[in-house]
Image: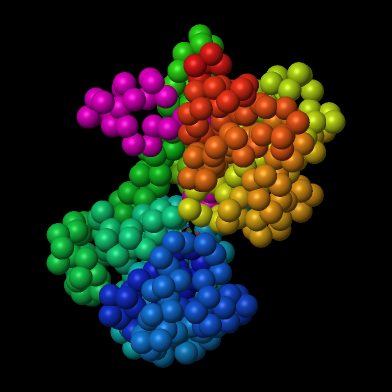
Amino acid sequence: MTVFGTGYLGATHAACMAELGHEVLGVDVDAAKIERLKAGDVPFYEPGLPEILKRNIEAGRLSFTTSYEEAAEFGDVHFIGVGTPQRRGEYSADLKYVNAVIETLGPLLKRPALIAGKSTVPVGTAQALSKRLSEIAPAGDDVELVWNPEFLREGYAVKDTLEPDRIVAGVKPGGKAETILRDVYAKALSTGTPFLVMDYATAELVKVSANAFLATKISFINAMAEMCEAVGGDVTLLADAIGHDARIGRRFLNAGLGFGGGCLPKDIRAFMARAGELGADQALTFLREVDSINMRRRSRMVEVATEAVGGTLIGKNVAVLGAAFKPDSDDVRDSPALNVAGMMQLKGAAVSVYDPKAMENSSKVFPTLNYSESIEDACEKADIVLVLTEWPEFRNLDPQILDGVVRQKIIADGRTCLNPHTWIDAGWTFRALGRSVSV
Ligand code: NAD
């Protein structure tokens, strides 16, 4: 089989499919990325992936190429995992990479094949791609398309791919796609993973509605954080208390800076855009509010930090701990942490950023910020320390190591991940989103 696109999704999928025993060829247009992968080097941070990448290359089950001709010859099943980013200046998804795979691969398909789309796409895409394939593939209707959305989480991508919660297959009635896909995932299915077969549109909707639900849960608790700030309550106690209700659940109820990354923000926007195109925009107007609650948290963080240092950031040194959009990842796409760091710099602060894994990516996106080698380096002469990504080394930070390093002992917790008492007892002024100061 082949996997087109070897980014976070594709490289993980290719290595995991090889781990399941398949012969896999990863394909990308980025020659530098392919060279690194060939050498057994994962071009991004994902726990556990380097080991299975190397193991499967050495076992001869996994290889990489930039050649579509080689891929068409090699594979009977072709996965598509290329990006579907937000269009610049618009909400809708840009399908140019998915379309490019179909337009380039399609004419090379001379024998029966299954194309399995994994990228997150607007509802209606699979139907259109299936029609296009039947026009351009020499093997005609013997080239089938299945939509098989991916639910992996960065940081847990290997486990999520090898042991998914469920496998969704959007198929055209009467084809062989279901049988072939069941065969591909036989190992996962043998352990009882649900295999859910449906039409194309529903499969596409499953993915974006799952992301819309998760985004809504986060923005819900962040709206409650705004209420807690208005009355001096504590959103972490609130989340624990409502989370005990099994109908609500405690997971994904952590208040803080909100969601970011390469998926949730662009996926809910693309979902709204598609609803508009379908004349169903009213169904998703609530997502506009979900998005704005999310973005408001970032400016609120800047306000909280500014107030804490006396009302202005001009001439202030700010230490930002965290740059990745979440821990266990080096992904800085739409990162709330970097967004806050950038806003504070614009307001006159000298900002120094430290992240255990995302420094290289951050300095590409925000070259004007200062980057530090360590927590202590970033905090040198800081007027305030901000924790903006919930890495364990920040969560468990011992205030003592910053004694004599910072200029002022003020810490602001953007992820409700610190124990306020640890910091207050060590003589620090403690600020947080959604929690009253006196905790
Ligand atoms: P990414 O940007 O990390 O990777 C995309 C890759 O596709 C890049 O390496 C790029 O060079 C390659 N590419 C672009 N055009 C190509 C072409 N014509 N042929 C071959 N390769 C091409 O993106 P990602 O995070 O892996 O996301 C990919 C898709 O998966 C998106 O639709 C995303 O929404 C979805 N998804 C991502 C995640 C995640 O956690 N990252 C989870 C679920 C779904």
- Image x and y of residue 112, in percent: 31, 84
Q: Residue furthest right?
A: 315
Residue 153 lies, in percent from the top left, at 41, 53
Q: Quadrant of the N terminus?
A: bottom left
Residue 186 sits above or below residue 344 on the image:
below
Q: Number of numbered discs present?
A: 0
What segment is highlighted magenta in the picture?
A: 236-264
Give the image quarter of residue 342: top right
Instruction: Tell me if residue 153 comes above or below residue 12 in the rendering.
Output: above
Nearer to us in this view, 421 or 307: 421
Which residue corresponds to the image point at 52% horizontal and 46% vertical from the top-left?
393
Residue 137 visible, this angle = no
* Residue at 53% from the left image edge and 13% from the top image edge: 438
The colouring scheme, among rainbow, by chain, secondary structure or one colour, is: rainbow
Vertical relation: 399 (above or below) 133: above
Does 250 lie within the magenta span? yes
**In the figure, residue 388 lies in which quadrant?**
top right
Q: Say which of 340 and 125 sits in front.
A: 340
Magenta segment, prevailing SS (helix, strand or loop)? loop
Residue at 33% over, 49% down: 206
User: In front here: 64 or 434?
Assistant: 434
- The x, y position of residue 74, in whole percent, is 39, 88
Residue drawn at x 66%, y 50% as measured from the top left: 374
The residue positioned farthest toward the top in the image shown: 231
Q: Is residue 417 visible?
A: yes
Asked if the stretch drawn in magenta spans residue 43, the answer is: no
**Nearer to me, 235 or 202:** 235
36 relative to 246 in the view: left or right:
right
